[in-house]
Image (tube, rainbow, N blue to C red):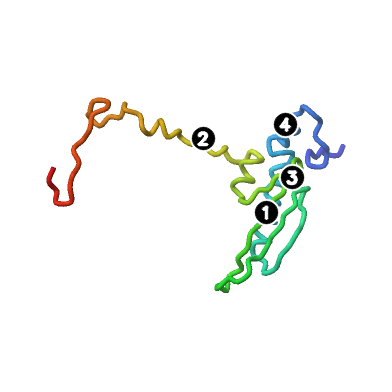
Amino acid sequence: AAACSLASAAPQPGSALWRSAMAYGGLTLEQAEEIKAAVNRVKKQSFNSDTTVHGWRITYTLRVGGHSDRNRGDFCLHDPRNGKKIHSIIDFERKIGLREPEPEPVPVEACLDDDSDDGDPPGAKRARWTLTGDR
């Protein structure tokens, strides 16, 4: 009997393989790595390009007027599910679940809290120093 290959079989909805693929935005880990490799390839080019890898459109626009010998440009990944643009590999990895989401910013009010451990009672004012160092 021939050995069963999971790579050649389409995952059944609800199966562990299907859930794994859905965790990466419908991509397998291998496909996600291929997309990242394609982005790295186009970033090394000295011309504009537009290609599609596993349904993800990758555009690269070379910047003009640079004063460097290095190729400088901007890439963009277009999410095939909703058309949203992604401008960094880190954001791509976050989008498909390979990286933790960006932490929520701390509200300014939390930074201004009077419960700091500076030894002063809440609302206390400190003396200001002048340029001469006198109080």
Write down the quadrant of residue 79 in the picture. top right
Is 109 left or right of 65, judged from the image as shown? Answer: left
Three-letter code for the amino acid on which mark 1 is drawn: Cys
What secondary structure is found at the residue carrying circle 4? helix
CA gap between label 2 and label 1 equals: 24 Å
What secondary structure is found at the residue carrying circle 2? loop
Q: Mark 1 highlights which residue?
A: 76
Three-letter code for the amino acid on which mark 4 is drawn: Arg
Three-letter code for the amino acid on which mark 3 is drawn: Gly
- Marks 2/4 in contact by CB < 8 Å: the verdict is no
Q: Mark 4 highlights which residue?
A: 19
CA gap between label 2 and label 4 equals: 27 Å
Disc number placed over residue 83 in the picture, else none: 3
Residue at the image point whose x is 64% and y is 65% from the top: 44
Is 28 left or right of 113, judged from the image as shown? Answer: right
CA gap between label 3 and label 1 equals: 11 Å
